[in-house]
Amino acid sequence: MMTGNPILSGAAMRAQQLEAQYSRKLKDLRQAKEDELAQVDERHKVIRTSYRMERIRIKEDFSLRRLNLKTQIERLKDQRSNLRHALSVQDEMIDSSDNAMLEDFTSRIEALHKQVIGLERQLVSALNDAEAAFDNRCKENQEERRAVNKHYINQADELHQQYLAAVEQNRQARQQEEGGAEV
């Protein structure tokens, strides 16, 4: 009873080499796919980080603009208050020019309040735009991921077809070597 044949026939050696070559190419193909998908994942992380930083930048920008407007409002309120105090100290009657100055302060304050309200709307709009841009970049990233997967599926299918063709070629060669007998 023999325990394994140390001398392989030509057909068996070709089959073994073919199998090893196919396995190695398939392994390399899978590794290339994983490497490329890792790059796609890294780009997605950059996109996500960029989006977060953009949101922070937008919020900080609008906070500074809001603070500037509120500071202007408080300054105008103080000036209006000082004018009222100065007018109340005077013994004279408040004339129309003084009244116009008070109304001017009030209207400027109201205009700044409207700007603050408009700024809130602009903030919401800017954040929505940033989110829409992020969503689009995410969709592009997912499309890229699908394209990579599809490419490697096609490559693996092509490799498999080549392997099957080589197996068939080896089968035919073995039949010729063995004199046409089907094994």
Image (cartoon, rainbow, N blue to C red):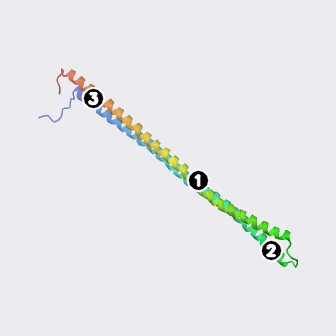
Q: Classify 10 Å Cα crowding around label 2: few (below 14), some (14-19), many (20 and above).
A: some
Q: Amino acid at mark 3?
A: Val
Compared with 21, 144 (above or below) is below
Is residue 124 something that shows in the picture?
yes
Q: Quadrant of the N terminus?
A: top left
Check disc 1: other Cα within 10 Å, few if <14, some if 14-19, many if 20+: some
Q: Amino acid at mark 2?
A: Arg
In this view, the residue in front, 120 or 14, is 120
Going from the N terminus, do you reach mark 3 or mark 1 first? 1
Between 151 and 85, the residue placed more toward the observer is: 85
Q: Amino acid at mark 1?
A: Glu
Circle 3 SS class: helix
Lower sequence index among marks 3 and 2: 2
Task: Say which residue appears at 78% left-offset and 68% top-offset.
Answer: 103
Q: Nearer the viewer, mark 3 or mark 2?
A: 2
Circle 2 sits in a helix, a strand or a loop, which is it?
helix
Quadrant, the C terminus: top left
Which image quadrant for residue 125?
bottom right
Give the CA separation, mark 3 to mark 2: 100 Å
Q: Mark 1 highlights which residue?
A: 54
